[in-house]
Amino acid sequence: MTTELEDKILYMIQSEQLELAREYIFNGFKEGYDLSKLLMYLAFVYEKKCEVAKAMRHYRASLDIDGTNEVALYNLYRLGDASKSPIRYR
């Protein structure tokens, strides 16, 4: 995945432009980019939409593909503990 695409996705998520972020993420799926990261980014979108169960499902899916993804692991545990800590994006 290109750094430019990742930066666009993260910018869209952080600026609450979630539908546009989803479009970029789905384009990434079509292009065959890093599946683990794309699933994690989709989890960010669901978390921003307060859809915690879907976010956790996507964090787990990301970890199933890449068990070394520390950002997905951190955010999964953070959600599981109902922590008020903010999302860690990187």
Image: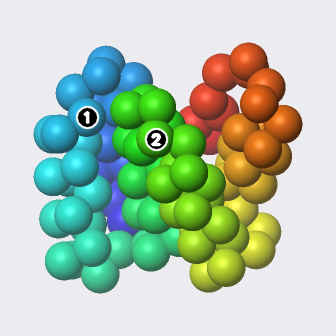
Residue 11 screen position, x and y as percent: 33, 29
* SS of the residue under disc 2: loop
Q: Amino acid at mark 1?
A: Leu
Colour option used: rainbow
Q: Residues within 10 Å of mark 1 (few under 14, many from 20)?
A: many
53 or 83, nearer to the observer: 53
In the image, is 53 to the left or to the right of 48?
right
Residue 69 screen position, x and y as percent: 71, 62
Total number of numbered discs in the rendering: 2
Q: Work out which quarter of the rendered image holds the C terminus and state it.
A: top right
Say which label, 1 or 2, has the lower sequence index. 1
| Image quadrant assignment for residue 1 | bottom left
Which residue bears the numbered disc 1? Answer: 18
**Marks 1 & 2, CB-CB < 8 Å contact:** no
Looking at the image, residue 54 lies above or below residue 12: below
Residue 72 is labelled as none
Kindly report the distance in space between the C-alpha atoms of the residues bearing marks 1 and 2: 13 Å
* SS of the residue under disc 1: helix
In the image, is 2 to the left or to the right of 76?
left
Residue drawn at x 37%, y 48% as measured from the top left: 6
Q: Amino acid at mark 2?
A: Glu
Residue 51 is labelled as 2
